[in-house]
Amino acid sequence: MKEKIRLGYLPTFGEVFDFEDAKRIAGQVREKLQNSELVDLVDIDWLNEDKIYYHEEDVERVTKYFREQEVDAVFNVVCAFGAEMSVCRIVKELNKPLLLWGPRDDYPREDGWRKRDSQCGALATSKCLKRFNIPFTYIVSSTLESGTFRNGFENFIRAANVVKKFRGLRIGQIDTRPKTFMSIMVNETELLERFGIQIIPCSLINITDEVLNMLESERGSLEKELADYQELVSCDGIEHEKLLKMIALKHAVKNFAVREGCAAVAMHCWHEVEARLGISPCAAMGMVSSEGIPVTCETDIHGAISAVMAAAATLGESSALFPDITIRHPENDNAELIWHCGPFPMAEKKEGAPASLSPDHYNFNDGCPGCGEFLMRDGDITLVRFDGGTGNYSILTAEGKTIEGPYTRGTYLYAEFENWPKIEYTIANGIYCHHAAVVYGRISAALYEAAKYIGIGVDAMGPSKEEIETYLMGN
């Protein structure tokens, strides 16, 4: 796992039951979290000698500490019944995703009295959270080593990473959308007021000016980077100067994103770049995407948001592809071509597959080279689209797997889904458009969980909502 979240650990104990056994459980979970590759642990082991929360007067101390430590989420382990009010007060103040779990109780003691009643305490806490209108994630009563706990915990971490990246998101916008692309229009004010998402505009002239300046001031480093690139990608028939412009364009776009703190960039990628620089921007966009900053085509801002969410759910294990939803597989009714002109990240190219740059844009025949052409790697994928219309926002998810398909130009893969006609029908009749983000891995459950914290709907196209919930219940 490349990315982690800062997890506030909150083991709690009430006024009754077996205090020693509650401390034992708290210690076992603490040890597991300390060894986890998914989290940086922020513990309350400093709070008292027992390293467990049990005094309501400590609410403000714990809240203050978690805030100072900038936790991304909180994990309440109900070690014994009875601290629901404190949990609600802490999480309400922090406004961070909460994982709630009551470890499965062992046999009662020899005297017949139960040790912890953790399940009962977790259910009391869940009701209190509902009273406070606090969203939370629940793991069914289970043992620490069970698949139910493992799946629920990892899914929560992925969801919390999505929420972390979504809140306060900044999207770089390089120029306007193409005139005809009404399908990707957005309400910038609504994105800011409802979600806190900021759109940071930049003129394409500024980007291309930086490219031209770099050709003068940084030619040596561009030459070296180009030589390395040509070891991986065939660039036959393309002028050397135009190849240098592609490398410089990659840096100009990335520099803008880094300078403005943008997690992704939506870029006007049609004729203006070609007119100013004599190249297609596709390959340069893919280079930036390979380095962890998704760049989406046709200034699709909702698409950029989709890419950030999808990549976050993989914890950085997959770069985001940004395809058109193009054509159905000629023989497989549930398969689809996942394609775009040439901007997919080389980081996800199929090993051993040839890679080249087109000598011009093969759709426009404009003499402007720069479209990447290669097949993407095999594996499980998830197609993701965050979108909005008429004041409503939701996210569509669909899991699939790559399959063989006929050759086509550009960057592409074919993927088979559980029920492609249902996906297509939902897109056409919903608020979604013909663009999506695609990542490797199965992340529908994480996005389903993240949506409750963000406050948007979910169209789960396979697995369904019912199947996701069944999985999270441990069945």
Image: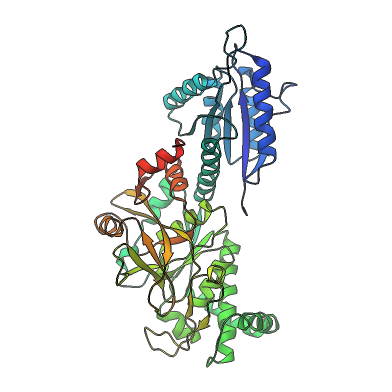
Q: Position of residue 164 (x, y in %)?
A: 54, 47
* Relative side of 279 to 15, left or right: left
Q: Position of residue 151 (x, y in %)?
A: 52, 41
Q: Which residue: 49% across, 77% down?
A: 374
Residue 121 shows in the view: yes
* Relative side of 237 to 193, left or right: right
User: Outermost residue, top direction?
Assistant: 111
Q: Which residue: 52% across, 20% down?
A: 121
Q: How is the image coloured?
A: rainbow
> Looking at the image, which is closer to me, 34 or 126?
34
> Looking at the image, which is closer to me, 408 or 301?
408
User: 144 above or below 343?
Assistant: above
Quadrant that contains the C terminus: top left
Q: How many marks?
A: 0
Residue 176 shows in the view: no
User: 353 above or below 104?
Assistant: below
Q: Position of residue 326 (x, y in %)?
A: 33, 70
User: 448 above or below 237?
Assistant: above
* Relative side of 238 to 407, left or right: right
Q: Position of residue 420 (x, y in %)?
A: 31, 59
Q: Which residue: 35% across, 63% down?
A: 184
User: 38 above or below 57?
Assistant: below
